[in-house]
């Protein structure tokens, strides 16, 4: 753990800057984030309800001890990643062959269908990443969280976070290129 | 710093918003949390807030929800709110450590009496328009905490409270092996109220109760499973009815 991260953890809370926040407000503000991230960290659709509920039950239980040393979103992410670990099926190597095909021209005729296809493809691609790269990619690329926040949320230094993001992109681009090559070969 | 190739960028952009919860998802999660935490957890106001300056002590943490529930009960004349809290403690869960926390300091925290102006977050069905555009988090303007929370006049709040209470009572009846009573509760609510934020949940509960009694109509079950195929409710109805 880098020194900058340690100093963040050791820095005393700054109470004056924080406004009162109720559970209800936090729920409204962060439900979408929790839902999306849990799904993208590999919680299956069928377990998503329970996982999201578990996250907010923990938030409710622990809110009184939140000291604003990190942002609320970063704090909540820490809970999401633990809950997601409990709710996702054991990882197996899934060849991208099993993944749905990339959006086709036919599919793109319908925006909703295209997005559903893209979503399935994205999940299949994410499933090929290891957990370390996956969470950096989800937070930095998909949630567009600033890299210092990503590093803090995961508990790594910023350089490591950048390196994991680069590695994740390379991995996904290779996987996508292979998929396209296979589709081209199958349908001359 | 490199950027994603156009191919990868296209996949990312095309899936934007695809993982957001929809209206049914929001209603389900909210309903389940109200059942587990009590409606008081979804009430905003002085008594329901926490600050870093006054980390709630154990006493305050346990007393405040009761005060809020009591205020709601007396204001709305709904007794169910207080009884949820006492009758249904949250289910035992494996402890999940929250990050960045230290043990709560034992300091006398102010216990604020609930404000008479109680704000209840609107049911997701009304708070979130179906057509609300879903954009990337960065494109979305930063929302201050509290935005999206709609103040509901006190006289309108009992609908959600009553609907949740009816749903919970139906589930309790089914768990107690009395699906007949569950159906009576659901029918009683439906006859008095049209629509509702938890209509799909009530429909699912009704089908499950009917299936437990062996009275479900195949057409109704298959229609529900078709229309809510991606919903976890469909899995529950399927488990109860397709055995």
Image (cartoon, rainbow, N blue to C red):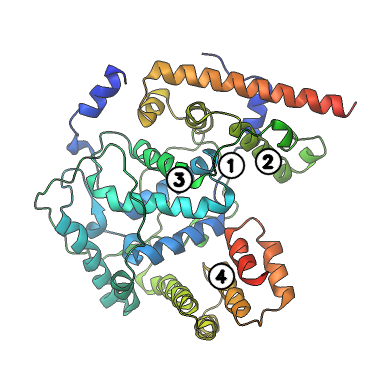
Query: Percent x, y for residue B233?
Result: 58, 63
- Give the vertical position of A37 relative to B61 (above or below): above
- Give the vertical position of A37 relative to B91 (above or below): above
Nearer the observer: mark 1 or 3; the answer is: 3
Query: Percent x, y for residue B11?
Result: 66, 31
- Give the vertical position of A17 relative to B172 (above or below): above
Residue A141 shows up from this direction: yes
Disc 2 is placed on an element classified as: helix
Count of numbered circles in the view: 4
Q: Kindly check if marks 2 and 4 are in contact, taking CB atoms under 8 A apart as contact.
A: no
Which residue is nearer to you in this view: A174 or B54? A174
Residue at image point 39% right, 19% down: A158
> Label 1, on which residue?
B17
> Label 2, on which residue?
A115
Q: Kindly check if marks 3 and 4 are in contact, taking CB atoms under 8 A apart as contact.
A: no
Q: Kindly check if marks 2 and 3 are in contact, taking CB atoms under 8 A apart as contact.
A: no
**Badge 4: residue crowd in 10 Å (few <14, some 14–19, many ≥20):** some
Estimate the spatial distance between the alpha carbons at disc 1 and disc 2, rounded to whole Å.
8 Å
Disc 3 is placed on an element classified as: helix
Residue A105 relative to residue B87: left or right: right
């Amino acid at each position: 753990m880098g020194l900058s991260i340690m100093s963040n953890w050791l820095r005393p809370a700054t109470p004056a800057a924080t406004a009162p926040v109720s559970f209800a407000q936090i729920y409204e503000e962060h439900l979408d984030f929790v839902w999306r991230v849990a799904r993208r960290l590999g919680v299956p659709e069928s377990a998503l309800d329970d996982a999201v509920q578990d996250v907010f039950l923990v938030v409710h239980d622990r809110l009184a001890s939140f000291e604003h040393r990190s942002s609320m979103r970063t704090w909540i992410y820490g809970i999401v990643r633990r809950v997601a670990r409990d709710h996702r099926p054991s990882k197996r190597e899934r060849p991208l062959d099993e993944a749905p095909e990339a959006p086709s021209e036919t599919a793109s005729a319908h925006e909703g269908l295209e997005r559903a296809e893209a979503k399935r493809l994205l999940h299949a691609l994410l499933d090929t990443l290891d957990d370390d790269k996956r969470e950096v990619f989800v937070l930095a690329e998909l949630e567009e969280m600033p890299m210092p926040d990503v590093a803090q949320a995961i508990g790594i230094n910023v350089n490591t976070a950048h390196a994991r993001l680069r590695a994740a992109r390379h991995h996904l681009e290779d996987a996508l290129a292979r998929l396209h090559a296979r589709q081209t070969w199958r349908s001359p | 710093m490199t950027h994603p190739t156009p191919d990868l960028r296209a996949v990312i952009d095309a899936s934007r918003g695809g993982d957001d919860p929809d209206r049914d998802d929001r209603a389900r999660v909210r309903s389940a949390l109200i059942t587990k935490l009590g409606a008081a957890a979804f009430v905003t106001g002085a008594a329901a807030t926490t600050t870093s300056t006054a980390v709630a002590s154990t006493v305050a943490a346990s007393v405040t929800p009761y005060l809020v529930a009591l205020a709601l009960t007396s204001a709305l004349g709904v007794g169910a709110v207080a009884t949820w809290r006492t009758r249904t403690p949250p289910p035992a869960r494996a402890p999940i450590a929250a990050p960045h926390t230290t043990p709560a300091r034992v300091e006398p925290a102010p216990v604020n009496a609930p404000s008479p102006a109680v704000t209840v977050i609107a049911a997701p069905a009304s708070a979130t328009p179906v057509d609300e555009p879903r954009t990337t988090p960065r494109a979305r303007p930063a929302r201050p905490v509290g935005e999206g929370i709609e103040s509901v006049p006190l006289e309108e709040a009992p609908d959600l409270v009553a609907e949740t209470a009816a749903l919970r009572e139906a589930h309790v009846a089914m768990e107690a092996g009395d699906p007949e009573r569950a159906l009576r509760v659901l029918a009683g609510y439906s006859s008095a109220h049209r629509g509702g934020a938890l209509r799909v949940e009530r429909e699912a509960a009704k089908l499950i109760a009917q299936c437990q009694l062996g009275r479900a109509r195949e057409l109704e079950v298959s229609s529900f499973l078709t229309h809510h195929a991606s919903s976890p409710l469909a899995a529950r109805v399927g488990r109860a009815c397709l055995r």
